[in-house]
Amino acid sequence: MKTRPFKQVDVFTGEPYLGNPLAVVLDGTGLDDAQMQHFAHWTNLSETCFLLPPSAQGSAGGADYRVRIFTPGGELPFAGHPTLGSCHAWLQAGGQVRAQGEIVQECQVGLVRIRRDGTRLAFAAPPLKRSNPSPALLAKVAGALGLSAHQIVAAQILDNGPVWLSLLLDSRQTVLQLTPDHLALKNMGQKVGVASVEFTQSATVLIARSNREARAFGPRSVAAEAPATDSCTLEVRAFAAPAGIAEDPVTGSLNASLAQWLIAEGLATSSYVASQGVCLGRAGRVHIEQDGQGQVWVGGESVTCISGQVEL
């Protein structure tokens, strides 16, 4: 056992206790996988992080530090709120950036760039792989969520390290009224993200368009579209029973992959704010921006709620 510096950080909020909490052990050296997993299970938070020096390969690529990310049930190759929360804690503890302008984090998915904009940090969304879910899987998930075919606008399997079956639903009300069968989702081994899009213009234009994802489930092929100058907001929920979390308060990896999918398909604008956590009494805000090179950045504020030491 060793005394190690520790922080608990609230991510995707500027006000304590309204975001997604994250445990950060600022010195994870000497801990093995089992010890990290045991502590993550004990904290019972959606994620617990352990900061380490970069590997030789990571250091050669410019990494400032390395992070390992654990849920109560296992290790993740990448996750969004641990990326921002770990960076916030590392900087607050005196971490020195090797290159001006960006922080480079090493994790199992590779090197992740992080930039600062005042008090807000934003990470570069990792490359996304996406595919169509099978009609059988989509039907099972819809049943577990209590959804009808006409409520599903589009569906994709999104993979940027974590894998989410993601559904674009017809309204914010539909998203917020879901009461999932978490045991059914756990037995399927399926993490599910849901979202709805609302444009800020006074009159949203609905157009019929060909939508291969929606056709996989049923006849609906209607999506919201607005001129590129208009902004939009998303309402997001994340159900992660297979990872030991019924509902995650605010999810950076899911918001990253949703942004890449929805912007590419013209279902969301290139800059918007996503809301998540309403049903859990939170007020998470995720800031999305696609830059001129097509890179999607996922940002938010973080606040430290607990600073101290942990015996580990």
Image (cartoon, rainbow, N blue to C red):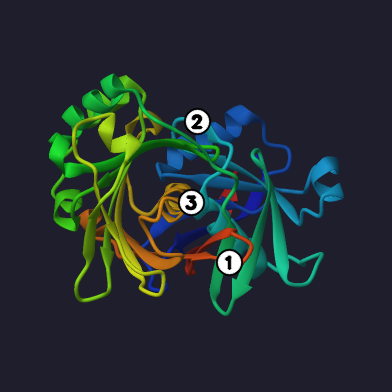
Q: Amino acid at mark 2?
A: Gly
Q: Is residue 165 visible?
A: no
Q: Residue furthest bottom?
A: 118
Residue 207 sits in which quadrant? Answer: bottom left
CA distance for labels 1 and 2: 33 Å
| Secondary structure state at the residue bearing disc 3 | helix
At x 44%, y 54%, the residue is 259
- Residues 310 and 195: in front is 195
Q: Is residue 135 above or below residue 114?
A: above
Q: Amino acid at mark 3?
A: Gln
Residue 161 x/y as whole percent: 55, 37
Residue 143 x/y as whole percent: 17, 28
Task: Say which residue label 3 marks.
Answer: 260
CA distance for labels 3 and 2: 26 Å
Q: Mark 3 or 2 closer to N-term?
A: 2
Task: Say which residue label 1 marks.
Answer: 291
Residue 296 x/y as whole percent: 55, 58
Packing grade of label 3 (10 A; few <14, some 14-19, many >=20) is many
CA distance for labels 3 and 1: 12 Å
Q: Is residue 48 above or below residue 181?
A: below
Q: Quadrant of the N terminus?
A: top right
Judged left or right of residue 237, residue 121 is right
| Secondary structure state at the residue bearing disc 1 | loop
Task: Say which residue label 2 marks.
Answer: 74
